[in-house]
Amino acid sequence: MAESTGVSLSDSQDSIQEKTAITVTTKDTPKGSENDPSGENDIENEDAIIVTGADAALHLLPLRDDFDNVLTFRSILLASGLACFQAVMYQIYQYKPTMITIQGTFIVLIAYFLGNAWAKFLPRGDNYEARWRVKGGHGKLPWWILALKFLNNGPWSLKEHSICAITATSASNAAAATTVFAAQDLFYNVPLSAATVILSTISIGLFGYGLCGIMRPIAVWHTEAVYWSTLPTVKTLQGLHWQQVKNSKPLRYFWYAFTGMSLYEIIPAYIFPWLNSVSIPCLAAQKATGSTGAVLNNIFGGSTTNQGLGLFSLSFDWQYITSFQTSLPLKLQLHQAAGLGACFIAMIGIYYGNGWNAKSLPFMSTKMLMTNGTRYPIDDVFPGGVLDEVKLFEYGLPKLTGTFAFAMFMANAAIGALIVHCILFWGKDIRRAYRSAREGRYDDRHHTHMTKHYTEVPWWWYGLILVGSFVLGIIVVTKEHVTLPVWGYVVALIVGIIIAPFSTILYSRYGNGIATNNLSKMLAGLMIPGRPVGNMYFAAWSHNVISNAVNLSNDLKMGEYLKIPPRIMFITQIYGTILGGFINYAVMISIVSGNRALLVDSNGNSSWSGATIQAFNSNATSWALASYLYKTGRQYSLVPIGIVIGGAAVVVHRLFYQFVPKIGTFDVAELNMAQFIQYAGYIPYNQSQTCVLLSWILSGMYVQYYLRNYRPRIFKDYSYLITGAFDGASLTVLFILSFAVFGAGGG
């Protein structure tokens, strides 16, 4: 791999420190700030090639801290408003024909304009104080100046801006969990109360936050815990506040890129959507019919969900490419490309080799099917959400497409590989990180700065969060009719506790994690069969807890990059999580009660659609048949065994590494079987438009291989800023189009 020059993730921390020291002393020029005039903490090498987390901490992410205000009246008010906005929009788009994700630089830009408008157009207390001083005022400030400073203290600062974005993200995390309650309300005669929704949502969110607090030494304070996919947002925030358009070329290019993408995105998103899927093979074979046409469609088709593999297709629509892909480190780009290539080969082999009787069913589908390929009658088999064994005997067991069965097997194998890889390759590093935290030694210079200047959150605060959220969940499962027994609730949390650290570590170091929802639903189906609603709640208190732990750890690291005091981060993240629980409930219940018939109907209309909720419900009910489908001797018994096989693959990898640590200059420990296996089964399980996969690979390789290695200055100063501008522009245009022409605002 091209990244062999960097430090292996299995290397000792001493070697990382040694590399850091060497990097610092070569070709570096100190670059101070007003708070660090000596420049001893801000080390910048314009020609440095950024490979490891230590490289990013030294050369990509400035240590600058202006020690400006964070919690002000306007930052709290705007953070609350944007938290409500993002929570509402996330919730609304769960029920819209057009689904968009509002995140990253879109919220950053909204907060930027609102905050600057507040600072510019409302009377500023600091200006009136200066005039009062000039006129001879001294001593205690008059009450009216104090009031103005409270309302509008001065220029809109980076930290005020950052806390708005972080609080909004915390509030929107609950949107995914509320799908459980909407499905319960729409499809089952199971009582649903405000207490169930609000307490469950807060419990899930806060338990994830408690876990991320316990994991801080490995998930936040570690120098390799970079969270690469959040860097475009961080660089955008810093660029908007630390640079001025008139004398900053990168910031000027940010606005050029934003304007250009705003104009361009209208074309693929609305005027000429064919640009989302350009396939020369499909164009050349438009007249192909019969078996030839079917084969060509399976291999080259990819403009719609589950159409085909999308081989050689390209997407020119940035809303599907995003900075998430271009920000991922090269090691993940290579794992992704190799894994997707293996997925292509495996899917073709399984289907045309008739594995799991694949040729009798469609090439790709995630639905439960009858033996003739039609949709399995889930509603008849689960009347009222409870399994009817007579109907099950009448219709027979459902079938899975061969490609989907393979994808579920690989998803489980990736989870097994994740756990074993973290133990065998990173176990010593994890123990060392906790030991260093107890001794007050840190390898990340950003965290060292934070401990020097700010008071850290005590461990027992997070312990109280865990206890409190556990009690809230107990109240729900004992007092509300959720069909999940208390022991099932406890097991769900144990699953979350076990997997969350591994998932967070991998995400923090690679920028992308391993999906765990497949495992959660399968375990629930095996332990509480015939209870689809209980299956949903089990997955919520395991998979969603893990997801929240990853997201909130990401935000904590973002807070360290932006130098937000830890205790303020603690308060605002909890505030956003709790606020999101109430907001998501209010919006969900309003939409569901007002549009029940449309949401239950599979078609809906131009304004509302229940497709997302219906798919979630079908998935839960099908997993309630896990004991019939995946037990030993059943047709799909290999699927759960994937966990063991994935773990065994890593054991073989570790043994090979023990005897052959390097092949030439390539460090064998840089292989990550979990990431490779995940992408080797990625396509069927994610139901994505495959036309974008090649565009992901090409754009990611261009930024992370070519620019990073051969144009390091452009990579450092422009790549994250420009792709962040592309994100903000494409989401802004899509947001406007959704309400103007796509039906989000009404018929």
Image (spheres, rainbow, N blue to C red):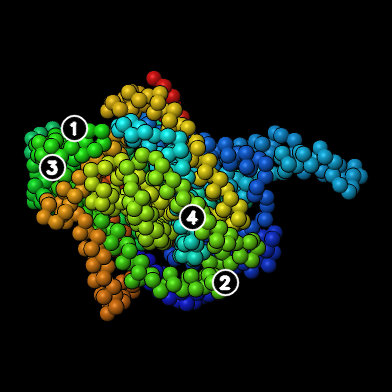
Disc 2 residue crowd, few under 14, some 14–19, many 20+, Cα 10 Å? few
Q: Residues within 10 Å of mark 1 (few under 14, many from 20)?
A: some
Query: Which numbered disc flags the more N-terminal residue, 1 or 2?
Result: 1
Measure the alpha-carbon separation of dots 3 and 2: 58 Å
Label 3 sits on residue: 397
Q: Quadrant of the C terminus?
A: top left
Q: Position of residue 507 (x, y in %)?
A: 40, 57
N-term mark: 3 or 1 = 1
Please name the residue that numbered disc 1 is placed on. 380
Instruction: Please give left or right for residue 628 compared with residue 327 in the image.
Output: left
Q: CA distance from mark 4 to mark 2?
A: 26 Å
Residue type of the residue flagged with mark 4: Val
- Near-viewer residue (639 or 466): 466
Residue that label 4 marks: 467
Cβ–Cβ under 8 Å for marks 1 and 4: no
Label number found at residue 440:
2
| Of 335 and 602, the residue lying toward us | 602
Q: Is residue 188 above or below residue 168?
A: above
| Disc 3/disc 1 C-alpha distance (Å) | 13 Å
Q: How far, Cα to Cα, is label 1 from label 4?
A: 41 Å
The kind of residue tagged 1 is Asp
